[in-house]
Image (cartoon, rainbow, N blue to C red):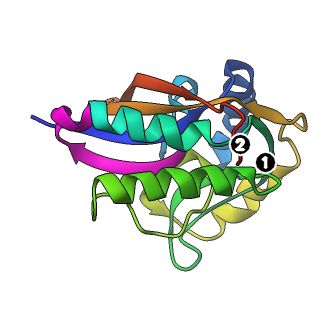
Amino acid sequence: MGLRLFVAFELPAELRRALALEAGKLRPRLPAGRWVKPEAMHLTLAFLGDTDRALVPELDRALGDAFAGHRPFELHLAGAGAFPPRGRLRVAWVGVESDGALEAVQASVAGALRRLLPGAADDKPFRPHLTLARCNPPWPRSALATLEELAGRLPRRPVALTAGTLFASQLKPGGAVHRALSRYPLAGGGG
């Protein structure tokens, strides 16, 4: 049996609590959705899906090298919105931005995964965000105005990122449960 895997940055507990608090203030004005629990909030770099357990040691080595080539960095929360850009909304999110360091780390991770597991890694363009809710049933576009209010309430302090994580995710009726399998420090290499 395989493991449902993804690679992400964990977020500081204080930030997760602040996001949940501010999003919670807007929830009564938004349609029903499956809101991400604070303990499950993260910044996804790559989703692998169902992966053979036997590959985890190789993944560890490849991801360790990918993260070690970069220095720790900061990112900032930047706006709020929803996907997709047209039609009814399916995912509510908070945006993030960095000085390019986040995109460089993600490119290294994606490259390592492509070399190790050709065809397994998601090839969609990287759109860094923190998922707040899955809009099920899909929300009308009018909900964007409420989400945009969240942008003015976001914490302003930069978020320090120092390590990436390989997670196993188990789908449960109450939402996905994520378990950290390995952590990979940003070791200060040439990134």
- Examine the residues drawn in magenta and state their main secondary structure: strand
Label 2: which secondary element: helix
**Residue at point 31%, 52% (across, down):** 116
Q: Nearer the viewer, residue 20 or 98?
A: 98
**Residue at point 69%, 29% (across, down):** 162
Find residue 91 and report its horizontal and vertical position in percent.
52, 57
Q: Residue 82's quadrant in the figure? A: bottom right
Q: Nearer the viewer, residue 57 or 36?
A: 57
Q: Residue furthest bottom?
A: 86
Q: Residue 145's quadrant in the figure? A: bottom right
- Neighbour tally class for label 2: few under 14, some 14-19, many 20 plus, Cα within 10 Å: few
Q: Nearer the viewer, residue 135 or 30?
A: 135
Magenta-highlighted residues: 44-56
**Residue at point 67%, 48% (across, down):** 29
Q: Is residue 158 visible?
A: yes
Q: Is residue 31 visible?
A: no
Q: Is residue 17 above or below residue 23?
A: above
**Residue at point 65%, 62% (across, down):** 143
Left or right side of 92 for 18: right
Q: Do the residues bearing badges 2 and 1 touch, measured as CB atoms within 8 Å?
A: yes
Q: Residue furthest top?
A: 13
Q: Amino acid at mark 2?
A: Leu
Magenta stretch: residue 71 in it? no
| Quarter of the N terminus within the rendering | top left
Calculate the distance from the C-alpha at mark 2 to the C-alpha at mark 1.
8 Å
Q: Earlier in the sequence, mark 2 or mark 1?
A: 2
- Neighbour tally class for label 1: few under 14, some 14-19, many 20 plus, Cα within 10 Å: some
Left or right side of 111 for 128: right
Find residue 78 and report its horizontal and vertical position in percent.
80, 53
Label 1, on which residue?
150
Q: Residue furthest left?
A: 1
Label 2, on which residue?
26
